[in-house]
Amino acid sequence: MKNNTTKTWHDIWAGKNAQINKNTEANKILEQLFVLTGFDSKSSSAISVENYRKFVSETFKWADLQTCDSLYEVGCGAGVFLYAMELEKALMGGGQQQMNSGFARLGGIDYAKNLCAIAQSVLPHAHIVQMQAKDFDTNPQYDCVASFSVFHYFENLNYAKEVIYKMIAKAKKKVLFLDILDSKKRDEDKSYKIKAYGEEEYKKLYEGETKHLYYEKSFFREIAHDLNLKCDIKDQNITGYKNSSFRFNCAISKEKL
């Protein structure tokens, strides 16, 4: 009998699994993590490990993460962003850490148990926990608290706002909200995805239980303004990542204006 049960995003991510070969070079590990992150989908196609690492390097400099010795990710999935950032920190150093040593502390959460296990396996010194995005403790604090390509999975803006305030509270220095869907580009994004998938497949993937959530840039600016914090926003620009055209990045500094 055909199973007509509607899948949620949690069902989709919980269904992803793989045995990661950790006895290989870093870029090969990232390639394996890419598949578990959705970078092999039709809408994300053409992004390479090299271009992703270039984006991570640019983000590291843009957000001034040289001053940060610890990193925590909300919605870390299989650990691709944490792993890439750890590589960048080892290259760049900064803070109290020497070159080639990475972050002093890494942590993260994700709601998919299977992905948490993979993240923990590739980052054995990290503290990875399975839980919903809004349920993490604000202590202990980390220098930088980040999310990458997660906020469009949230159920509504009130949920997102709760997570944002908690991320800011948990961070000592920097807060990053990366790969956020831009509400001003919603129609363009929809047209692009329908062209990539076809209308029927688009409806299955992006409507109903798996509908994506879009954001105004002002949503983040207003929260930062209310807390008297510096907020910097720029459009996403990962070479080869076709979703870039419809997304933006936001960095909030805990330094008061």
Image (cartoon, helix red, strand yellow):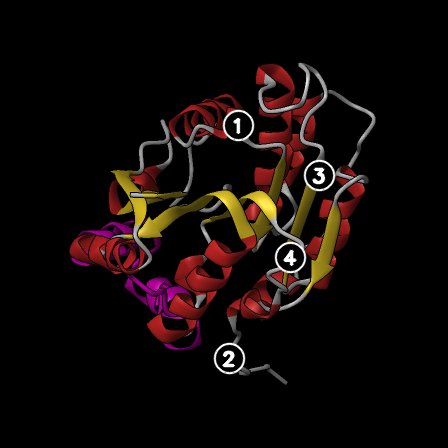
**Toward the viewer: 225 or 236?**
225
Label tally: 4
Which type of secondary structure does the marked residue at label 2 adopt?
loop
Q: CA distance from mark 2 to mark 4?
A: 25 Å
**Which comes sooner in the sequence, label 1 or label 2?**
2
Q: Which residue was labeled with disc 4?
A: 109
- Judge whether residue 204 is colored magenta: yes
Neighbour tally class for label 3: few under 14, some 14-19, many 20 plus, Cα within 10 Å: some
Which type of secondary structure does the marked residue at label 3 adopt?
strand
Q: Which residue was labeled with disc 1?
A: 67
**The magenta segment:** 186-214
23 is higher (above) or lower (below) than 107: above
**Which comes sooner in the sequence, label 3 or label 2?**
2
- Percent across and percent down for residue 15 are 66, 62
Residue type at tag 1: Thr
Give the main secondary structure, helix, strand or loop, of the magenta stretch.
Answer: helix
- Judge whether residue 13 is colored magenta: no
Q: CA distance from mark 1 to mark 2?
A: 45 Å
Of marks 2 and 4, the one in the foreground: 4
Residue type at tag 2: Thr
What residue lies at 67% left-to-right and 22% top-to-bottom? 97
**Which comes sooner in the sequence, label 4 or label 1?**
1
Residue type at tag 3: Arg
Q: Which residue was labeled with disc 2?
A: 6
Neighbour tally class for label 2: few under 14, some 14-19, many 20 plus, Cα within 10 Å: few
Residue type at tag 4: Ile
Q: Which quadrant would residue 111 be assigned to in this image?
A: bottom right
**Which comes sooner in the sequence, label 2 or label 4?**
2
Q: Which quadrant would residue 194 be assigned to in this image?
A: bottom left
What residue lies at 47% left-to-right and 28% top-to-bottom? 60
What residue lies at 16% left-to-right and 55% top-to-bottom? 184
